[in-house]
DNA sequence: CCTTACCGTAAGCCATAGCTAACCTTATGT
DNA sequence: ACATAAGGTTAGCTATGGCTTACGGTAAGG
């Protein structure tokens, strides 16, 4: 795992998010992913490289076909990061409400 | 709420993530946030503007001081987005494992 | 009223990200 | 062996993002 934060930068790009959406049904080959998209296939390859290096997708080759699938671990790292922020935000918010009530 | 996805782009920047870390303890004024950081105060203001527009932080003014605090709703939107991906990823992974087992 | 503190905004510069086009690799098939 | 199919890689252009500097705005304090 890179460090779980690269995944945030990876998902910041709209194109990469639509790629993730296309992988929701299961593994897809590069050509299938690129089909119907407005950008070129090499561009998709570059995005897949970023997604892979960030730990969000996994690659499995089969002949000349490169299949990419969502990697649960990558999303899990993101979730735990957000959960930390979430917990602190709620705690701070609770303290703030408490101080308001004491006035 | 913008749409919950702007928050991803907002958190993609490392500087904005450290700002969020500084807000974990509760609301902070702009000057406090900028103190100790390597970048200038106007740069912090610009980052805070992005964080605010993405729904990740909320602003409350008090005199000339502008206090910023983590907005739980913004993080919640992100979490639900990731949970969607997470669920589908697990389902697809389970199907994949099942197909492997059937060989 | 004038100054000072605190902060947002605008202009400009520089670096990086994303795209396309062209090329190279590797595997399948005949 | 040759042709084709499927993808990764590179070079180069363009656009966008983030930073600084300089400026404008508002509230508090003497």
Image (spheres, coloured by chain):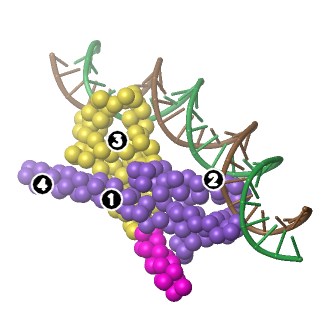
Chain colours: A yellow, B purple, C brown, D green
Q: CA distance from mark 4 to mark 3?
A: 26 Å
CB atoms at circles 4 and 3 under 8 Å apart? no
Q: Position of residue C30 (x, y in %)?
A: 15, 16
Q: Is residue B40 left or right of residue B67?
A: right
How busy is the neighbourhood of tag 1: few (under 14 within 10 Å), some, or many (20 plus)? few
* Badge 2 element: helix
Same chain for mark 1 and mark 2? The answer is yes
Which residue corresponds to the image point at 48% horizontal and 60% vertical from the top-left? B56
Which is more foreground, mark 4 or mark 2?
Answer: 2
- Residue B46 image label: 2
A43 or B55: nearer the eye? B55
The magenta span reads A84-103
On what subunit does the disc labeled 2 rest? B
In the rendered image, the quadrant that contains the N terminus of chain B is bottom left
* Badge 1 element: helix
Q: CA distance from mark 4 to mark 1?
A: 27 Å
On what subunit does the disc labeled 4 rest? B
Which residue corresponds to the image point at 25% horizontal and 40% vertical from the top-left? A28
Q: What residue is disc 1 on? A: B80
């Amino acid at each position: 795992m890179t460090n779980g934060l690269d995944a945030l930068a990876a998902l910041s790009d709209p194109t990469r998010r639509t790629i993730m959406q296309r992988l929701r049904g299961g593994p897809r080959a590069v050509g299938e992913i690129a089909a119907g998209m407005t950008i070129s296939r090499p561009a998709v390859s570059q995005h897949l490289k970023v997604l892979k290096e960030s730990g969000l997708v996994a690659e499995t080759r089969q002949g000349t076909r490169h299949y990419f699938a969502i990697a649960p671990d990558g999303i899990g790292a993101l979730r735990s990061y957000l959960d930390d922020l979430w917990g602190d935000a709620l705690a701070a918010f609770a303290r703030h409400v408490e101080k308001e009530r004491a006035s």
